Image (spheres, helix red, strand yellow):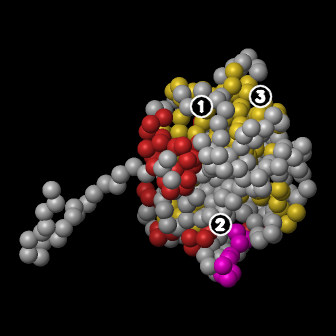
Amino acid sequence: MYEEPVGYATAGHRRYRRQPSGYERFMQEQNIPIVRGIGVRDVRELGLAPWKRMGGQGCFIHLDRVGARTGMYVVEVPAGGALNAERHIYEENFLIVEGRGTTEVWREGSARKQAFEWQPGSLFSIPVNTWHRLVNATSSPALVLGVTTAPITLNLFPNERFVFDNPFEWTDPYYEREDYFKPREDFEPHPEKGHAFLRTNLIPDVVHCYLPLDNTRGPGFRLFRFRMAGNTNFEGFVAEYPSGRYSKAHYHPSGAVLVCVRGKGYSYTWPKELGARPWEAGKEEFVKMQEYVPGGMIGAAPGGGDWFHQHFSVGKDPLRQVNITGGSRSGVLRVEWSNLDDDIAGVSEEIHEGGYALSYRDEDPHIRKAYQEALKREGVKFEMPDSIYA
Ligand SMILES: [Fe+2]
């Protein structure tokens, strides 16, 4: 029974814990491991458990400050088997980590099944509320990373029947077009940001596909952005840093997750409040670091608020990263911090120009030193041009 406070005593607990959200309850009910943190070194190292709903072994990845809006999981498609067919009213992207197989897609009640093949590095998206099934006809298991907007959807509508068994048909994103999953390679300028941009529903191989020169996040940086399957939230990119080079630091709110698909590297991330030079300020204990190899990932700004992040290629191969979660500057998140008529700074605009990227000149001297030591351990040459520090 509730008791009113007496006199000027205050009501309520001084501190309290919140209850799980609709998506957090959904995850708990699936009875598979939930991995938390700022990133993962390699999803192949994660412990999986039988996942009845999906029909394969799996686990959730619920990264700090990302999991409120973006759901992630890995699931194994058994050798000579298939996952259960499903449909849902949230958006879903798949990145193939290991193995080969086929995805079948069809509309409720339609006999026209479309199928396309995948291999390691294939990236595709399932149109909202269409049936889909991942099939593995080979003799070894396949490992798949799934990325969804299930958190937004289940947090707003915590009703599994509404989300997974909803008769409403979105006819717009999927017309059973013959060429729907035919990969497209015709880059156009991004309608807002101007970077190379691809509208496609399938990228057969993000590990080896061509990336146009971009240079915005560092010298020799390559990039294209993409939009798939009529998604409103998921806009992603494929990006690459040459061997022996690293990105400028920049800051923004959380949202983006970068998955390593080639090379190896590490990322630093720290709250903007620590300033541009946290080592020099004696605050390095608050800088977080994640190392990763292909199959690993880092939440770009895992602390909430604005966090700096900076990525370092340490392998002999270039470091290639895929963003399949969207981020604070694409999809629904940007509506939270920008008005429709705001002039938004792009990645190339530096802090001293009113942007949010830190020039190499202004970065903490520790960063270059530690990077050179990391390269030495790997036997890789430092390739940053001198001129960018001048
Ligand atoms: Fe970023």
Sequence-wise, which precedes: disc 1 or disc 2?
1
Amino acid at pointer 3: Arg
Q: Residue at x 58, y 39 (%)?
A: 73
Q: Separation of disc 2 and disc 3 at Cα?
A: 33 Å
Find numbered disc 2 in the image and state the secondary structure of the residue it sits on.
loop
- Residue 161 vertical placement versus 344 (above, below): above
Sequence-wise, which precedes: disc 2 or disc 3?
3
Quarter in which the N terminus is drawn: bottom left
Q: Residue at x 54, y 28 (%)?
A: 52
Residue that carries the numbered disc 1 in the rendered image? 54
Residue 365 magenta-highlighted: no
- Residue 300 vertical placement versus 133 (above, below): below
Q: Residues within 10 Å of mark 3 (few under 14, many from 20)?
A: many
The one of 99 and 17 positioned closer to us in this rendering? 17
Q: Kindly identify which numbered label has been placed on residue 100.
A: 3
The magenta segment: 340-348
Residue that carries the numbered disc 2 in the rendered image? 329
The one of 325 and 276 positioned closer to us in this rendering? 325
Find numbered disc 3 in the image and state the secondary structure of the residue it sits on.
loop
Q: Residues within 10 Å of mark 2 (few under 14, many from 20)?
A: many
- Residue 246 position by quadrant: bottom right
Q: Residue at x 67, y 82 (%)?
A: 341
